[in-house]
Amino acid sequence: MRKSLYLIGTILLIFLASESALAQMNRKNIKRNNKKISSYRGKKEWFSKEKRYNTLGIGLTALNYYGDLAPKPTQFSTDISFTRPAVSLNFSHRFGPRYTIAAAFMYGTLRGADSESANSGDLNNGVYRYQRNLSFRNRIKELSVVASLDLFSNMATYISRVKWTPYVFMGVAGLLHNPQALAPATDLNGNPLPEAGTWVNLQSLGTEGQKGTLSEGDVNNGIKSYKKLQVAIPFGIGARFRLNEVLDLSAELGFRYLFTDYIDDVSQNYVDLGVFGDNELAKAMSYRTNEIVDPNLLTPTQTRDGKTYNLLSGYGQEYIDNKRGNKNDKDTYMVTTIKLTYILGKTFHRAKFR
C-alpha cells in the first residue's frame, strides 16, 4: 500500500512538473506571437505580392483645347463653351503600396472657332482673331501609359486599402489626330463649293503651303506637312476613393503636352493664295476672312499665279507680319476625368505567424 502511494506521488510530481514546463513554453510562444502580431504591417518590399492587383475601369472625360484658336494669345486661354466629352477605357496594375502603372485608350473631340471665342471689341487681339475666322474640330484617339504615385501608402491588402488618397501621374501617349473644318458655301470667287457644309480634312490641303512650292524668300519656306500620329506627355493630379472592397472612384485633372502646333491646323503665316494653284477648296480653307467682314473693306489683290481676289489687308497674303498663328507655342489640351475602376485580380497571401 505504502509503495503504491509512493508510485502515485512520483507520477503526480512528474505530471505537475511537465505541466509547469509546458505552460511556461506556451507563455513564451504566446508572448512572441503577440509581439509579431502587434508589429505586423505586411511585407514592406515595394513589389510584395500582398500589394499587387489589377483593375479595369471606364472614364467619362471633358476635353478643353489650348492653342492658336483660343480667345486670347496666351498658353492658359481656353473657351469653356467648347468643352467636349470623351470616353476612356483603362487597365492598371498596382505593384506596391504607392505605385501603379495604367494603360488607357481615350476617344474624344477638341473644338475651337474664332467667330465664337474671339472678342471683336478687343482692339488689341480680339479683332484680329475674329477677322481671322478660322475654326476646327479634331477627333482624338489616344493610347497612353502612365505611372502614378499615391500620397497615402497602402501597406495592407486590396481589401483593406486606404479610404482615399491623392496621387500624381505622368507618362507617355501616342495620339492619332486629323483636324477638320466646315467648308463654306462658296469659294473666294463666289462659286458654289461641292464640299459646302461638310467637314473637310485640313492636313491634306496644306493650308499654310505644305503642299505647294514656296519661294526662297517666303516666310513659310521649308514648311513640312505635320504628322497625324503624334506623341504627347500626359501629366496631372487626381484623388481616388474606395467605394467598397472591389470598386474605386477617381477624379483626375490632367494635361497633354504636345510636340505639335497643328492640333488645330494653325501655326505659322499666311501664304500667297497662288501657292494653291487651282485648288479652290484649299484657298477657301486657308483664308476665311471674307465670310464675315464687310465687303467694302476688301481690296483687289493679285496672287503670284496672276489671279485676283478681294482680300482684307493683313490676311491671306504673303508677308512677315501676316500671321495665321504662333509657331513658338505648342498646342495643349486639358483632360478632366471621372473614373470608375473594378479590381479584377489580386495576389493575396495570408500572413503566417511562426
Image (spheres, rainbow, N blue to C red):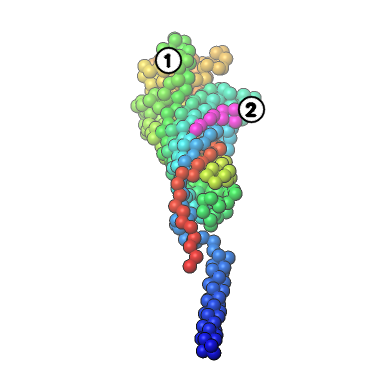
Within 10 angstroms of label 2, few (less than 14), some, or many (20 or more) residues?
few
Tell me, yes or no, whether the highlighted magenta stretch contains residue 82.
yes
**Where in the figure is residue 166, as x and y percent of width and height?**
58, 48
Within 10 angstroms of label 1, few (less than 14), some, or many (20 or more) residues?
some
Q: How many marks?
A: 2
Q: 176 or 90, which is in the foreground?
A: 90
Tell me, yes or no, whether the highlighted magenta stretch contains residue 349.
no
Which residue sits at x=45%, y=24%?
A: 180
* Side of 45 relative to 117 (left or right): left
119 is higher (above) or lower (below) than 106: above
Query: What's under tag 2, amino acid-wise?
Result: Asp
Q: Secondary structure at mark 2?
A: loop
Q: Which mark is residue 122?
A: 2
* Side of 35 relative to 188 (left or right): right
User: Mark 1 sits on what residue?
Assistant: 195
In three-dimensional space, the C-alpha distance between marks 2 and 1, rounded to whole angstroms, equals 33 Å
Numbered range of the magenta stretch: 80-87
54 is higher (above) or lower (below) than 221: below
Which residue sits at x=53%, y=39%?
A: 340
